[in-house]
Amino acid sequence: MVNLGVLVSGSGSNLQAIIDNIEAGRLDAQIKIVISNIPDVYALDRAKKHGIPLMVIPHKGFKREEYDQKMVEALKANKVELVILAGFMRIITPVLLRAFPMKVMNIHPALLPAFPGTHVWQMEVDSGVKFAGCTVHFVDEGTDTGPIIIQAVVPVYDDDTADTLNARILKQEHKIFSQAIQLYAEGRLEIKGRRVLAKGFPKTPDSFMINPPARIFER
Ligand code: GRF
């Protein structure tokens, strides 16, 4: 059982997916505390509804490092082992990372290292890529640069907008974030340099996706 601290800034649909997987017995974790930097976000209502302790720690007036120190104190006081950034719209400093080394996970709505940063869906559509997706990674001192744990791939269609692509990616985020946490809980993740190895999975070397779908060259 892994003790989670979930940091949020918005709607909290990823938080909800984690709560649902825990309540369904699919995820061997408990959420010790949900912390938001913004009051009145919907993620806090979700936590309240499920009886999960919550805190608002507003960031205004604090230097990033000071803010992260407050965050570390709250996380440690609640016996958090793994910190989950579920739509937390703040840059994390080494103050938090040193207190939780390779124990901070983030979800990003793109196939990193492509498309780091914010508001990536329009960039994905405009770039003409045929596949997009999402990534769960350990957080390091860069922006969206930490070791990759798991990725999910979705097709990009000709009539996609940022919103339709976001919705397709978000569905997969809700699966892979819990899966990454469960792999951690089972002790199956091994970090080797930039690589995160997930032990005990069969290989599927013939699996593939083609977009637009392959037709005439099938054999
Ligand atoms: C998601 O798009 C996630 O990839 C990004 O922030 C958003 C969070 O959405 N990091 P929600 O608050 O979990 O609904």
Image (cartoon, rainbow, N blue to C red):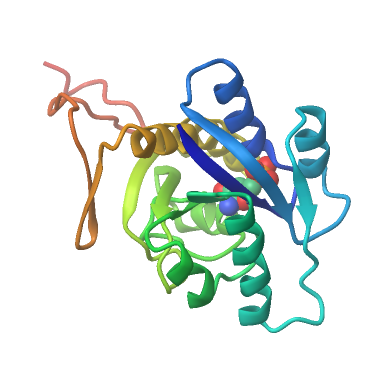
Q: Residue at x 37, y 62 (%)?
A: 146
Q: Is residue 46 left or right of residue 86?
A: right
Q: Quadrant of the N terminus?
A: top left
Which residue does the image show at 63% across and 65% down from the upper left?
73
Would residue 54 appear left or right of 203 to someone viewing this image?
right
Q: Is residue 3 above or below residue 70?
A: above
Residue 181, percent from left and from top: 43, 38
53 to the left or right of 93 = right
Q: Residue at x 43, y 73 (%)?
A: 142
In the image, is residue 42 above or below residue 202?
below
Q: Is residue 169 left or right of residue 197?
A: right
Q: Which corner quadrant of the image does residue 49 belong to?
A: top right
Where residue 101 sits in the image (x, y, percent)?
39, 63
Foreground residue among 16 and 129: 16
The percent coordinates of residue 60 (x first, y second) are 81, 76
Query: Is 47 or 159 nearer to us in this picture?
Result: 47
The picture places residue 155, in percent across and down from the top left corner, at 43, 35
Q: Quadrant of the C terminus?
A: top left
- The residue under the point 70% across, 41% down is 12
Residue occupying the far right of the picture: 40
Which of 174 and 113 lies nearest the eye of the viewer? Answer: 174
Asked if residue 69 can be seen in this view, the reply is: yes
With respect to residue 32, does 40 lie above or below?
below
Residue 160 shows in the view: no
